[in-house]
Amino acid sequence: MNTFFPYAVDIKFAPLWLPLGLRPSKDGVAITDDGRFRATFGFLRLETPLDNVTGAHITRGYRWWTAVGVRVSFVDDGLTFGTNTKAGVCVHFREKVPSARGLKGYSALTVTVVDLDGLVRALGADHGQP
């Protein structure tokens, strides 16, 4: 059975993520039975083998313009699938996950899921992380 972590949605930011096709009841992060990490955000998707996940940690207190919607970091090559400004999980990858847009790929993905600790535990338990 797949493990699914839905997004913690702050409805006041809906105008920023609705055009991307986000479905709060269906989109989020899945750890699949066949050993995959999959994050969906409306029309967008990022997927990689679980073996490519090297760790995950909780981050908090985002500015709305850097955290809500789909954002590429100007500081590094990270990607955000964000639905609120409170908190999320930054998931790190050993090898960059290719971008559908032909960019060089992403070394991390931040996702603003409901169960932050649960996602960190699920990823850590599968990969020997604390």
Image (cartoon, helix red, strand yellow):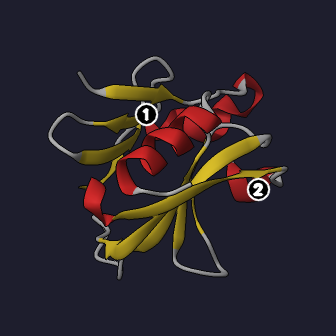
Q: Residue at x 32, y 47 (%)?
A: 37
Residue 109 rendering spot, x and y as whole percentages: 50, 59
Estimate the x, y position of residue 73 in percent, counting from the top left: 61, 72
Q: Nearer the viewer, residue 76 or 100?
A: 76
SS under mark 2 = helix
The residue located at (72%, 27%) in the rendering is 10
Numbered disc 1: secondary structure: loop
Identify residue for label 2: 65
Query: Residue placed farthest to the top in the image?
Result: 25
Type of amino acid at the residue the image marks with label 2: Trp
Q: For the point 47% across and 29% down, which residue is it? A: 5
In this rendered view, identify the residue nearer to me: 102 or 104.
104
113 left or right of 104 in image? right
- Based on the displayed image, in which of its 4 quarters is residue 33 positioned? top left
Residue 54: which numbered mark, if any?
none
Q: Is residue 70 visible?
A: no
**Quadrant hosting residue 71:** bottom right
Q: Please provide percent x and percent y for residue 52.
A: 31, 65
Give the Cα separation between the discs numbered 1 and 2.
Answer: 19 Å
Which quadrant is the N terminus positioned in?
top left
Task: Decide if residue 125 is on the left or right side of residue 31.
Answer: right
Residue 9 x, y percent position in the rendering: 65, 27
Front-most of residues 123 and 112? 123
| Badge 1 or badge 2: first in the primary sequence | 1
User: In which quarter of the view is residue 102 placed?
Assistant: bottom left
Which of the numbered marks, if any, corresponds to residue 21? Answer: 1
Q: Quadrant of the C terminus?
A: bottom right
Answer above or below: position of 102 versus 88.
below
Residue type beneath disc 1: Gly
Q: Is residue 26 above or below residue 120?
A: above
